[in-house]
Amino acid sequence: MLGSDGLEQAQSKKNVFSRERQLQQPTLDLPPSFKPDVRNQSDGLIFLQSLQATSFPLCIFDPQYRGVLDRQKYGNEGQRQKDRARLEQMDDELIGHFITAIDRVLIGSGHLLLWLDKYHLCTGVSSWIGSTDLEIVDLIVWNKMRIGMGYRTRRTSEYLLVLQKKPLRAKGVWKAHDIPDVWNEKLAQRGGHAKPVGLQSRLIDCLTNPGDMVIDPAAGTYSVLEACKATDRHFLGCDLQG
């Protein structure tokens, strides 16, 4: 018959949850051309290819796709999303190259947080991740708390796909268990490329340790940099526009 200590240990082994994070980021040898905790101007693929393999616990990636805008052709996207419309669109093949490069630099059981719109959520991302060790493990809906475009329903949300590099595990890796799968956050800054600092901060805190470095190869408005500053993490990333 188990005593109280033995019973607690047995229950702990069965429990798939843990509030302690066991993964540690290895010592980094950063490329001299990219500086941490600042805005770097570069092509994201060149940035990713310069990083050492299996070295980062978390990447946040917001691909520059305009597929939904090109298909819907509202007629006012040039006025409503000027900055985003000026950037060159990433096609599926290029996004796949980015995700393959992200897979290379993530540590085992590390995470990719991939921003999606409704079009890409419905059409699927299997072609982007098929040749990687990444698997989809969760989905978070970001309620932007303001109405957007749409022929039929009007968009009020975007989607954050949570992918993990094998081996898949939650215990000792995902340390918070109170994050809702629908996150309400209104942006103070308007713009098609802006993302919620609050949500990203919460996930960075959950999926990394203080002092760890988070990467972002298509930083846009650098909301991930803001989130890293808020959570005592380091940021390494770039954007074509700097």
Image (spheres, rainbow, N blue to C red):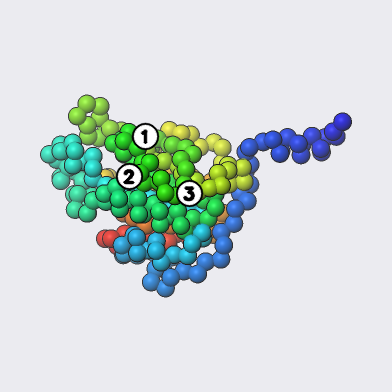
Task: Find disc 2 in the rendering and name its residue.
Answer: 188
C-alpha span from label 1 to label 2: 14 Å
Q: Residue furthest front?
A: 131
Q: Earlier in the sequence, mark 3 or mark 2?
A: 3
Q: For the point 25% across and 35% down, which residue is it?
A: 148
Q: Is residue 127 visible?
A: yes
The disc placed on residue 143 is 1
The disc placed on residue 133 is 3
Residue contact at pointers 1 and 2, CB within 8 angstroms: no
Element at label 2 = loop
Q: For the point 27% across and 51% down, which residue is it?
A: 90
Q: For the point 26% across and 60% down, which residue is it?
A: 241
The disc placed on residue 79 is none
- Three-letter amino acid code at disc 2? Ala
The quadrant the C terminus occupies is bottom left
Q: Residues within 10 Å of mark 2 (few under 14, many from 20)?
A: few
Q: Which quadrant of the structure image shows residue 15?
A: top right
Q: Nearer the viewer, mark 1 or mark 2?
A: 1
Left or right for 117, reference 34: left
**Residue 152 point in image, percent of width and height:** 22, 26
**Residue 22 point in image, percent of width and height:** 63, 51
- Three-letter amino acid code at disc 1? Asn
